[in-house]
Image (cartoon, rainbow, N blue to C red):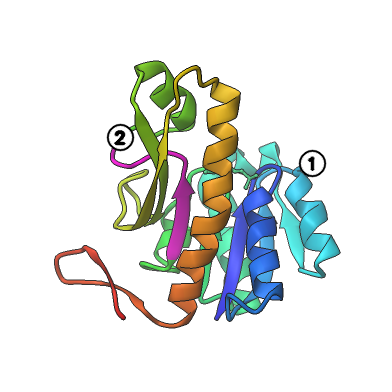
Amino acid sequence: MKIGVLISGGGTNLQAIIDAIGAGYIDAQIVQVVSSRPDAYGLVRAHEAGIPTCSLNRDMYADPHAANEVIASMFVQAGAEYLVMAGYMRKLTEEVLLAFPDRVLNIHPALLPSFTGAHAVEDAFNAGVKVTGVTVHFANAAYDKGPIIAQRAVDVLEGDTLDALTERIHAVEHVLYPEVLHLLAQGRISIGQDRKVHISE
Ligand code: GRF
């Protein structure tokens, strides 16, 4: 399975995927990393792993459709079969989504459909929920609303801080994303006619 990864920041999820591929757990190759920021540390991680990278800057997103066209053609050219958003903080538009229909994955640090948006951990913490977690889902035009592939709960503990909760959520992300990609590479993940995700044995 050839995958392209989209990042904007530290790239710890990217690193978890690189490591899981290196360990032979995910039968895949990352053919291209695209960053929405030239200073994303995830780019360093990609370089160190010998993965081709490309970064866009703020100016290029002045026209999001043009930016997405560049992104789509980059991944198509690299031969990517699936795209994996790993902390990518820009919206993907139809130029990419139509080029990879039902083939774009995202990870979200909350139990969707609760706490959509860019501040999910903080929003859940401030709401006082006792359980939050991590969701991996297919991305489509409706932000944070695509078919859910996998979820894992994370308890909010007595005396918890936002930092501590964020750290535990990240730790779960680094396990869950590789698990999903492992299943995807084995061809075990599909979307049914009901638009729900099914995972075969
Ligand atoms: C993760 O918490 C992810 O759920 C969110 O952005 C964060 C990315 O972290 N969408 P990293 O860049 O993988 O370290």
Residue under label 1: 39
Residue 110 covered by magenta stretch: yes
Q: Is residue 165 above or below residue 53?
A: above
* Quadrant observed for ligand 1 in the rendered image: top right
- Give, as a three-letter code, the residue at label 1: Asp
Residue range of the region highlighted in magenta in the rendering: 104-113
Whether residue 66 appears in this view of the structure is no
Q: Position of residue 147 (x, y in %)?
A: 29, 57
Q: Nearer the viewer, residue 196 or 79?
A: 196
Residue 81 lies left or right of residue 79; in this view the side is: left
Name the image quarter holding the C terminus: bottom left
Q: Secondary structure at mark 2?
A: loop
Residue under label 2: 114
Total number of numbered discs in the rendering: 2
- Give, as a three-letter code, the residue at label 2: Ser
Furthest toward the front, the residue is 158
Residue depicted at x 44% and y 74%: 183
Q: Secondary structure at mark 1?
A: loop
